Image: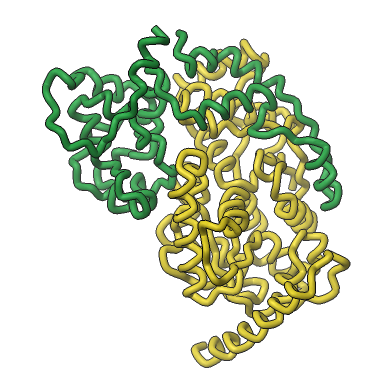
Chain colours: A yellow, B green
């Protein structure tokens, strides 16, 4: 299966480990990800300014992917996939908008939107097009029953019509279904679908940081070992802003990407997936090359492992 | 024209409870919203407040109240709506959009209000900064040697930025004029 791979600003700039994990597991699943030639913005930042500019920027990306002769364009960012899905659907259905945008594109880049492809988030793509059965068949490494709190992210779920209602926005399950194949225990927690606040970070940092703090408290209260995300910006919020002094919590929640968990279970080592050693150890994986992890951090991890041992027993009792 | 717009930039507080007089209202404002993409279902609002109750931003910052913004827009309180920080505080999570019993499509309505605000010369500085970046790099950031070295460490292909196509689209769309309010 060949698909265009749309990177997006945040993946290119700071979540290399996510990019790496996605490319590794795509390889394992027989998906050929072909990088879009031009690395450019999806168009989302133009949405608050001007609707037509927003459509034209996103359409420009869709046209570039269409030129590659593929059926799908895959994004690993929730916002990029929502933007591209929304515009792809709108331009396919609304003739008036399509004519307007095509006029702009023709006069600027000399190309037109043809509506030849579908947009998918990577997770949705492997869930639907590869399927749980095939994914299970390449899982060689059963992971520890680590308690994983999934965070879906708003633009993975909503508005559901732009994603063909593939996921239930009230009770989502795809990320949990995928993770459950690996042996980890996906858990539910309070206000699970709470927004990461990333979209208003530049407008009101104070509020978005408080949103992050709330989420971390809910995840901690549910006794999760890690928080799993599949959006680079959600990751920035929960991982980078967790270090912000304004958060001020007496616990830390490691943040991983869902494809990293899948990658570990498919036999890749943590280094190849850009996973931190102490987190990987928690999943029951050893020997990962030199990642320069400090002793103190390793010790932190060991305490965590004991905690997850007790939780394992709890699960058996309840199950 | 630009000067006049700048004069208006003393921020309005939507929580201002002073009595609104008729001459402060613009009866045409609602038609302007209806015409803007995203504003089509705006008149359906019955002020039930489901949006505000669903809002994760409101849960943190009680001053942010989308029902109140819609009400002010409905009665034509244009200044208050366009010239406040609140329309920029929607985190676009679509919770209200999903729950609205009248399908007002509030998240899209907020985009429409922001687009109208930009046309009238009210734009949040953070949003303005993004256009400059897009024009320069075609993306929200520059990918420098540092990022490419990091990518190499993870076994990832190098990124070469080529903002030409984005620049061409932005030029065609006169985005600069739209956000500078010179059109």
In the picture, measured across the screen, residue A52 lies left or right of residue A175, that is left
In the picture, measured across the screen, residue A46 lies left or right of residue A127, that is left
Closest to the observer: A31 or B45?
B45
Quarter that holds the N terminus of chain B: top left
The relative height of residue A200 versus residue A87 in the rendered view (above or below) is below
- Of all residues shown, which one is farthest toward the right? A289
Residue occupying image coordinates x 55% and y 64%: A150
- Any part of residue A138 in sight: no
Q: Position of residue A138 (x, y in %)?
A: 76, 67
Q: Position of residue B143 (x, y in %)?
A: 75, 35
- Any part of residue A79 in sight: yes
The relative height of residue A290 versus residue A295 in the rendered view (above or below) is above
Residue A109 picture quarter: top right
Closest to the observer: B117 or B167?
B117
The relative height of residue B35 versus residue A202 in the rendered view (above or below) is above
- Count of numbered circles on the image: 0
Closest to the observer: A127 or A13?
A13
Residue B183 picture quarter: top left
Closest to the observer: A63 or A198?
A198
Q: Position of residue A113 (x, y in %)?
A: 60, 24
Residue occupying image coordinates x 54% and y 37%: A83
Residue occupying image coordinates x 39% and y 16%: B6
The relative height of residue A248 versus residue B59 in the rendered view (above or below) is below
Residue A147 picture quarter: bottom right
Q: Position of residue A215 (x, y in %)?
A: 48, 62
Residue occupying image coordinates x 72% and y 28%: A67
């Amino acid at each position: 299966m060949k698909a265009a791979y749309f990177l997006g600003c945040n993946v290119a700039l700071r979540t290399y480990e996510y990019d790496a994990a996605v490319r590794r597991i795509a390889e394992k699943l027989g998906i050929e990800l072909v990088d879009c030639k031009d690395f450019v913005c999806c168009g989302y930042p133009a949405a608050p300014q001007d609707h037509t500019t927003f459509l034209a920027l996103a359409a420009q990306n869709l046209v570039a992917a269409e030129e590659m002769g593929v059926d799908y364009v895959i994004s690993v960012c929730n916002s990029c996939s929502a933007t591209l899905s929304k515009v792809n659907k709108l331009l396919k259905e609304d003739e008036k908008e399509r004519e307007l945008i095509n006029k702009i594109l023709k006069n600027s880049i000399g190309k037109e939107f043809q509506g030849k492809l579908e947009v998918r988030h990577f997770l949705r793509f492997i869930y639907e097009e590869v399927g749980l059965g095939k994914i299970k068949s390449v899982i060689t490494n059963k992971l520890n029953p680590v308690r994983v709190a999934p965070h879906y992210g708003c633009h993975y779920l909503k508005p559901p019509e732009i994603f063909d209602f593939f996921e239930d926005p009230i009770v989502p399950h795809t990320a949990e279904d995928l993770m459950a194949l690996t042996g980890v225990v996906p858990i539910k927690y309070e206000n699970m679908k709470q927004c990461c606040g990333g979209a208003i970070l530049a407008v009101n940092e104070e509020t978005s940081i408080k949103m992050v703090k709330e989420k971390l408290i809910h995840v901690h209260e549910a006794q999760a070992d890690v928080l799993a995300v599949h959006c680079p910006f959600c990751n920035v919020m929960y991982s980078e802003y967790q270090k912000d002094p304004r958060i001020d919590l007496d616990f830390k929640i490691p943040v991983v990407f869902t494809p990293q968990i899948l990658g570990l279970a498919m036999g890749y080592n943590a280094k190849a997936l850009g996973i931190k050693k102490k987190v990987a150890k928690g999943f029951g994986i050893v020997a990962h090359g030199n990642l320069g992890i400090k002793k103190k951090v390793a010790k932190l991890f060991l305490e965590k492992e004991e905690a997850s041992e007790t939780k394992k027993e709890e699960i058996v009792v309840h199950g | 024209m630009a000067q006049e717009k700048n004069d208006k930039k003393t921020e309005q507080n939507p929580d201002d409870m002073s009595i609104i007089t008729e001459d402060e209202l613009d009866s045409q404002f609602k038609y302007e919203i209806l015409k803007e993409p995203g504003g089509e279902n705006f008149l359906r609002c019955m002020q039930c407040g489901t949006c505000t109750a669903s809002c994760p931003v409101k849960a943190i910052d009680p001053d942010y109240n989308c029902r109140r913004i819609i009400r002010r827009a409905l009665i034509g309180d244009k200044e208050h709506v366009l010239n406040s920080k609140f329309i920029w505080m929607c985190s676009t999570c679509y919770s209200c959009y999903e729950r609205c019993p009248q399908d007002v499509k509030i998240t899209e309505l907020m985009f429409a209000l922001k687009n109208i605000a930009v046309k009238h010369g009210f734009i949040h500085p953070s949003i303005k900064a993004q256009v400059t970046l897009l024009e320069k790099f075609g993306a929200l950031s520059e990918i420098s040697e540092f990022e490419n070295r990091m990518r190499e460490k993870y076994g990832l292909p190098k990124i070469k930025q080529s903002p030409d196509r984005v620049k061409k689209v932005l030029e065609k769309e006169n985005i600069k004029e739209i956000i500078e309010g010179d059109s």
